[in-house]
Amino acid sequence: MTDGIQIMGIINATPDSFFGPSRYNMSILDEDIDIVDVGACSTRPGSEPVGEKEEWERLEPVIREILKRDYHPEISIDTFRCGIVRRVYDLAGPVMVNDVTAGSADPGMLPLVRELGLRYVAVHNEGEIAGSDVPSSPEPVLQRVMSFFKEFGKMAEGIDWILDPGFGFGKTYDENWELLAHLDSLKCFNRPILVGVSRKKMTMGTKDETIRAHKIAVERGASILRVHELPIL
């Protein structure tokens, strides 16, 4: 592992996540990871979000299984619904929240995260909830991301938030790599930077390209790498 970099391993509690081996992959808890990110509503391109009831039915048994362990990494919940966050908090106590909509899908999300004092990952997402590779604006990608987080920072006062540039969400292949090359520009927000490029289109879904992207991310100031598998470098 790389000194100073936290590793976020993925468990997808879904039957249709784009990377099959991450589905219900409890074995990742045996790896040297710092955070485990559990999602029960797929955000892969083309997927249909499930309702809150089904999301919780998928998620609850996985969280309970993690809690049975004598030791487990910090738990992160990949959800855009504040109702799910409340249920997980009642079951497991403080967790991290990883929201691909940065609070835009549920107006109750930011107030709840602030109330509970939870760490929060805000993802820059110009596409649908399920993602898109079509840019929403002719402006340069870095400019779009910078403008977004300037505004988000005002809304997130009092929240301990982590910046995720949203690789693969509303960005073309070239834009993703351009954004990664200029990742250090986002350090001006004085927030930890989370990079999730594992097995995405920009890395052609391959491990070698994912590792190459991880190396660039670490060089450019990433604090957290979100990964489907190890090793990551």
Image: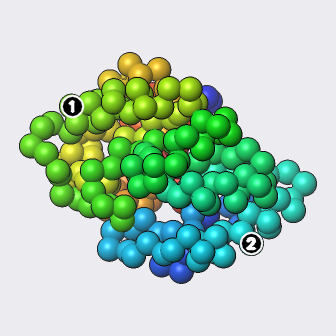
- Give the CA distance from mark 1 to mark 2: 41 Å
Q: Is residue 74 left or right of residue 110?
A: right
Q: Is residue 35 left or right of residue 224?
A: right
Residue where numbered disc 1 is placed: 143
Point out the residue furthest to the bottom here.
Answer: 15
The residue nearer to you, when weighing 47 against 101, is 101
> Which quadrant would residue 144 be assigned to in this image?
top left
Label 1 sits on a secondary structure element that is helix
Q: Which mark is residue 197?
A: none
Q: Which residue lies at the image location 74% right of the left edge and 63% below the top edge?
A: 63
Residue 117 x %, y %: 67, 35
Residue 166 x %, y %: 37, 47
The residue nearer to you, when weighing 72 against 209, is 72
Q: Which residue lies at the image location 53% right of the left edge and 58% below the top edge?
A: 81
Q: Is residue 93 left or right of residue 218?
A: right
Q: Which mark is residue 61?
A: 2
Residue 116 x %, y %: 68, 40
Residue 68 x %, y %: 87, 62
